[in-house]
């Protein structure tokens, strides 16, 4: 089941930061410079973390945080000056 995750990072190196951002943008909606809303199921999130996102980082210098946003959190989210929390489409056109 797809859930909404808030993913944010602080990466000290420009090259690693750019690479991580590009990888996250493949699956998630950027809402601020280093903050993304990600509609992923648990298995896909774990895959993205373990195989794609975390290998880019140097964890002694960088950090990545992933927060679950359940339906109650989504309903209580207040957004000013931009779009409401990302809602993935029910279909995908390829």
Image: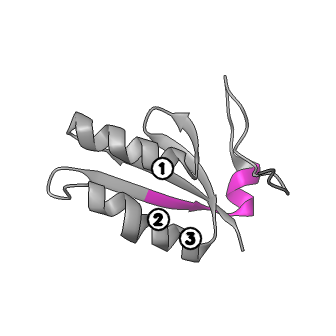
Residue 77: x and y in percent read 68, 45
| Screen quadrant of the N terminus | bottom right
SS at mark 2? helix
Q: Residue at x 26, y 44 (%)?
A: 16
Q: Quadrant of residue 54?
A: bottom left
Q: Where does label 1 land, which residue?
A: 24
Q: Residue at x 28, y 53 (%)?
A: 63
The stretch drawn in magenta includes residue 23: no
Q: Residue at x 76, y 49 (%)?
A: 87
Specify the farthest residue to the top.
81
| Above/below status of 8 relative to 48 | above
Q: Nearer the viewer, residue 18 or 94?
A: 94
SS at mark 1? helix
Residue 48: x and y in percent read 47, 65
Q: Residue at x 38, y 70 (%)?
A: 50
Mark 1 or mark 2: whose residue is earlier in sequence: 1
Q: Where does label 2 land, which residue?
A: 48
Please provide the residue range marked out in magenta: 66-75
Q: Where does label 3 land, which residue?
A: 44
Specify the farthest residue to the right.
90
Q: Are marks 2 and 3 in contact (CB under 8 Å)?
A: yes
SS at mark 3? helix
Q: Are marks 1 and 2 in contact (CB under 8 Å)?
A: yes
How far separated are the C-alphas under marks 1 and 3?
12 Å
| Above/below status of 71 relative to 16 | below
Residue 56: x and y in percent read 28, 55
Q: Residues within 10 Å of mark 1 (few under 14, many from 20)?
A: many
């Amino acid at each position: 089941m797809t859930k909404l995750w808030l993913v944010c990072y602080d990466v000290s190196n420009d090259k690693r930061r750019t690479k991580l951002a590009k990888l996250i943008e493949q699956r998630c909606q950027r809402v601020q410079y280093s903050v993304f809303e990600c509609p992923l199921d648990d298995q896909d999130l774990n895959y993205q973390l373990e195989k794609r996102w975390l290998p880019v980082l140097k964890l002694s210098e960088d950090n990545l945080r992933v927060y679950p946003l359940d339906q109650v959190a989504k309903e209580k989210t207040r957004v000013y000056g931009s779009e409401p929390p990302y809602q993935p489409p029910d279909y995908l056109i390829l």
